[in-house]
Structures are given as C-alpha cells and as structure tokens.
Amino acid sequence: MRPIPLSIVLSGFLFLPASIDTSPPRGFTAESGRTEREWESKFATMPDPAHMREAMRRLSARPHHVGSPYDKENAQWILAQFKSYGWDAHIESFDVLYPTPKERLVEMVAPTVYRAKLEETTVANDPTSGQHAEQLPPYVAYSIDGDVTGPLVFVNYGVPADYEELERHGISVKGAIVIAKYGGSWRGIKPKVAAEHGAIGCLIYSDPRDDGYAGGDVFPKGPMRPAQGVQRGSVADMPTYPGDPLTPGIGATKNAKRLQVSEAKTITKIPTLPISYGDAQPLLAALRGSLVPAAWRGGLPITYRFGPGPARVHLRVISDWSLKTINDVIAKIPGTTEADEWVIRGNHHDAWVNGAQDPISGLVSELEEARALGTLYSQGWRPKRTIIYAAWDGEEPGLLGSTEWVETHADELAQHAVAYLNSDTNSRGYFGVEGSHSLEKFINGVGRDVIDPETKLTVNKREQLRTIRNGRTEEKKEARDREDQRIDALGSGSDYSSFLDHAGVPAMNLGFGGEDTGGIYHSIYDDFYWFMHFSDSSFVYGKALSQAAGISVMRLASADLLPFAFTNLAETSGQYVKQLKKLRDSVSDQIAERNRSIDEGVYAATSDPRDPIFAPAKQEPPPQFDFASVEKAVESLDKAATAYDKAYASALSGSNSDASRQAALRSINGKLLQAERMLTSTEGLSGRPWYRHLLYAPGFYTGYGVKTMPGVREAIEQHQWKKVDPEISRVADALSREAKLVGQLAEELDHLK
Ligand SMILES: [Zn+2]
C-alpha cells in the first residue's frame, strides 16, 4: 500500500486558480478577454476532487464492457448527470458487430501437456476483482473463429523487423502458431503481420520485463501486472479503418447497409488470444532451437529460444458474433451568436472490465467540467458557440461510439465543427498534449494558465523543464528558446481518430501522466482499489485535467476570432519534410551497407556454422526523390501564416461594438472551420481510403504510433520507391491549399485594422 501524502490531499483544496496572466487569451479582444478570464477563474475553482472520487467509485463499481447491463446503466447515469447540470442531453445508439467469447482454449499438446488457465483470479482486499460472473474473460475482440494446432514460434514483439530476424535464422512461421510479447506496436498489428507470414494462430502475452515485476511490485502489493493478469483488447485492423467492421464509412444506424461478417476487412485472418505470463512461461520454456537475440529476451526465469517446437499448441477461439447496441451520451449547451459552430469534447465510458483508470479517470474530469459549465450557465455565462460533450460507448473494441457518431454526422461536422478535444485516461505528472499543430499556440496558452498541483508551476512550465531534463541537445535548446512547447502529432488509440483522420476536424488529446506506473491495463485489476492505491488518489490531477480541458473549451467557444495559428503548422510541416529527406538518406545508406556487406561476404564469414545466421536479401536502393514541390508549399504556408499572425494581432485590437467588424470576424471564423480540411484528401491514403488526413495517420505497421506525412513516409519505409514522388505531390497540394486559404484570411483580417 502506498499512503497518500497529506500535502497532496490538502493541495487539492487549497489551490487558488488566480489567472497568472491578465492579457487576453488568444482570439479575444481586450474587452472580451477580461470577461473571459473572469468566467474562467470562477470555472477553475469548481471541479471537485470529492465528486470525481465518488463518480469513479460509482462508474467502476461493476464491469461495464459493451453490451453489458452496467454499460447501459452507466450511460443512463451519465445522461442523468448531464441533465442535472442543466445540459440538453440524449443518448444516441448504434448497432455494431461486437464479438464476445464463447470458447477459448490454449493447450500445449507436446512435448508435455499444459492447459492454459486463461483466467484472472480474485485478489484478496480488492472487492471488485471477484465479480467473475459479470467480467468478460480474457480475450481479444475481432479475432476470427478458428481451431488450429501447430508448432510454436517465439516472434518477440511480432513486428515486421522481427520476422526479418527470424528469416535470417532460417525460421519460418508458415503453419505455426506464434507467441508475441505485448509492446513494440499496437496489439492488432501482431496477428496481421503473423498472418502475412503464414502463421495459423497468434498468442500475445504480457512479459514481466515490460509491465510486470521488473517495474515494481505486482498487484496487490504494487501497481504492476501479476502472473495471472491478462491484457484484453481489440485486434481489429484499425489502421485500415476503425469503428464497426460491418459499416465502414457510414453510421451503424438501425437500417444501415451492412457487410457480411465474412466481408469485413478488419477482422483478423488467424485466431488470436491474449495470455498471462503465468500461462506463457511453460509454453516458452518448452521451446528449443537457437537462443533469441539479447534484445528479444524478457523477464521470465527461462532461456528464451525461437522454436519452432518441439512445443505444439492447440488454439481454439469461438465468439458470439451478434450485433450489440452501444449508447453514446451526447449533451449540449447552446451557443448564442455562433450557435452553428460546435466545440466538441469527449471521453469514452465503456471499459474492458471495471476500468477505473481506463477510461473513468478521464471521464470523471469531463463530468466535473460539465457540472462546472452548467453552473456557470446558471450564473449567466453564455458561450458564443455550441458546446457538445460526449461520453462515448464502445471505444475499447475499436473506437466504435465515436466513429459511428462521426460517420453519421459527417456532413454536419464538415460545416459546423470547430475542434474536438479528447481525453481518455489520466494520472499524475506532466501535461501531455498531442494534436493538430494549428492549435499548438492555443494549447500552450492554456497550459500557461493551469497550475500543476505538485510543483505549483504552470503545467506548461513543468513540461518545458522535463523536456530540458530528458531531451536530446536539440530538444533542450528548443524547449528553452522556442516560444511554444512542441505538441506531438496524433496517431490512433482513442476517440479523436475519426474526427481528425476521417472528418478533418482539428483535434487534440489531453491528459496528465508520467509519474505513475502500472501493469493493470485492460485487466480486471484496473479498478477503484488499484486507482486509490497507485494513481491520482487525491484527484488533484483530475482537477487539473478538468481545468485544462474546460478552459480550452470555454476559449474555443467564446473567442472573437477562432484561436488557430498556422506558423507552428508551417514550421512543423517543414520539420516533417526534413525528417523525410533524412529518412530517405538513412534508408539509402542502410541498403548500400547491407548490399556491400553481402558482396564482401561479411554475413557468410561471421555466421557460426553450429548456429548459422543467413545473409539478408539484397535490396534495391532508393532513387533521389523530388521534395521541391513540398518545400515550396511549406514556404508559401509559412509566408501566409506569418502574414496571418501579424494581421491577427492588430485585428483584435479594435472595439467589440462595431457591427461590420463583427460580421467580418464571423465570416473569417466560418472559413477557419475549413482550414484543417484543406490538409485532407477525399480519396484518402493509398490502400486505406478511410484515412483522409495527409499529415497525420496511425502507422499501417505500428497501429497507435503516428506516421507524419504518412503517404510519403510509409512508401519510403516500405521501399515502394515509385509511390514516393506522387505522394509528395499530394502533400504539397494539401499544404498549398492551406497556404492559399490562410493567405486569403490574412488579407481579410488586414482590412479590419
Ligand atoms: Zn481508454
């Protein structure tokens, strides 16, 4: 047990959110900025850690996965909360394909027999860990049904590079069942890559080196994964498209036209199950063959070998493939003068089991924001724009609730959406932001107005100092000298994906973290007991998240001029182009070195005849690519963005009461709503048209991890040389469209002086 220091408990209540800065927030005139800051300082005192704690206890009291009784009860309860806060709220339902397990079997049939337990056991003291009747047993959603037996092969993390290593050892996984560690990629990549290499089944286990005893005491003594803990999750091919596998690109409404299950592209090709390290150990210990490379070894007290065999495994997975109903809770505060512009905020409410950390730690912050905004409304606060708060269902199996909602409302979103702000989990530590770089300046402004509860620095300052401590030389320099702290690009893994990647709505993901570790992710031990012992138990970071997200929403909803800025977007795009040129050169160097080493006989000479390693195949070196068009586009975006910034500053110095000025601002705001969409293409990315953003996408072979300028980057990474130049042109066109729009807006703003 880790006692909670009293100082932290108290700081939650002593915190005084005096605005540190009195200048108008980005997008506000002096006059409206003053009013905004007054409302914000009222707002900042309101999120209440005691309410968050109680809401977490309530929402995580029973398992609440998609289709479960408590999932529905939670949706109803959340709906009632929004209504009690004065919001106009309703439930929007969809019917989605969501398989739940009927039969699960993992059995080693040779050289000895071992039947995997495939269950997580009750832990003394943890009252909800024993709710077995309501828990989903460990499984992964969207594994195809199957019953297979074959030799076992250990494939490390199961990413493409691991299969190259296997090949060099002369090991094929054709006809084999692979066992991969969690980590190194999103889990759905593992069965996908295994099937591409001819495997017939896939097991995924949590190695104790990654989130078990190597990182601390295991639960319940500590926060880390115990021997029987299993990570559930989705293995749908989300880099192809997320959401309901049967309704890609359209909402899964009652009468939607659905694919047959056999036609759904995102279901795995081979049966897949997750197992604990308790169950993995006897299987791995029974493998023979060469020792794996040092980097592949985990933390189990065994010798890690590749196989194949002599361990043979029988794997059987059968699911119930019926449609299930998901319930999104959607709540609104109407805007006044700009009611047609929507500021959207969301966090999911479904969990794999009890889910105190994932997702309730984020949801309770969102609910407290909603309560506070409702209170402000009753006191006379009126946002210009409409605010929409969503509690999504079905995030865990595949971003179902948010994706189906976005697909259903795609046309409205294209006209009305200002931005989407997401959170998912929250814990103690540093303010993490990923998202659209046109919002980088804006969120830096918010981060300078929120206080870190542990250090009393602004959350922006604390993050800056962390970068100075941990960053490479160049990052340290930037953290010290650059006006704004950099935000990372968004990959996938939570509900922002469909907004940003599909609908072209600027999006950000916000959350605190970096101080708590844990190994309970997607297990029955992610519950109230765990959270109250090992995470933000005083909910002071829950309050900080409410402040950061709530203030962001308030500013976006009432700004005179929407607070986008494009200089950071231009600069970041320029960085991406530089990275791509470097990537081309380093890939070229690697291929040249590899080909030369093969010619020199390096591999043949250094292979141990008793444990041979084969030379890799020769590869075709890349040609030079023509980056000129995209460099030119970045330059024109930079020029337009600089002009915009200049005009922006003077445009907001005028008076609020001038009607023609108000009309002009309104027209500019309307056009700003289209800015992020300039960076998308209706044809989408090559081979995965659902993904339309040309700057950001989850990697086809990484899953969660982002690929920036994905068309270009993945063509280079996958050595598809002919595709590179056309992809560069597409990005150049997108950036040119953006530059043109921003340039026009700069001129319009200039006339306002
Ligand atoms: Zn989550």
Image (spheres, grey):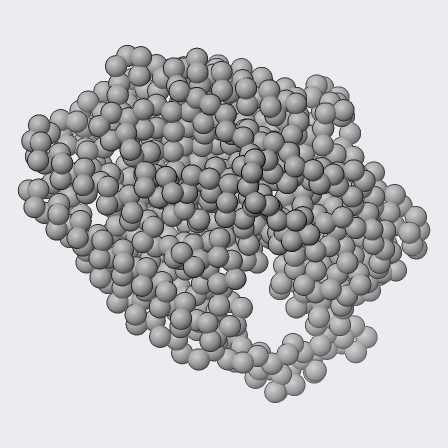
| Image coords of residue 240 (percent x, y) | 55, 54
In this picture, residue 616 sits left or right of residue 249: right
Could you say where residue 1 lies in the image, as x and y percent from the top left?
A: 64, 23
* Residue 355 placement (x, y as % from top left): 61, 29
Q: Position of residue 261 (x, y in %)?
A: 67, 48
Question: Is 241 above or below relative to 634?
Answer: above
* Marker count (numbered): 0
Report the side of 525 relative to 592 (left or right). right
Q: Residue at x 89, y 45 (%)?
A: 114
Q: Nearer the viewer, residue 487 or 637?
A: 637
Which residue is at 15% across, 32% downward?
29
Reply above or below: 523 against 675: above
Instruction: Name which residue lies at 46% across and 60% down.
Output: 685
**Is 273 situated above or below 536?**
below
Comparing 8 with 320, the one in front is: 320
| Residue at the image position 38 percent from the left and 48 percent from the top | 504
Residue 493 appearing in the image? yes
Can residue 46 be seen? Answer: no
Viewport quadrant of the C terminus: top left
401 to the left or right of 677: right
**In this rendering, is residue 158 above or below 121?**
below
Q: Is residue 483 left or right of residue 399?
A: left
Q: Which quadrant of the structure image shows residue 454?
A: top left
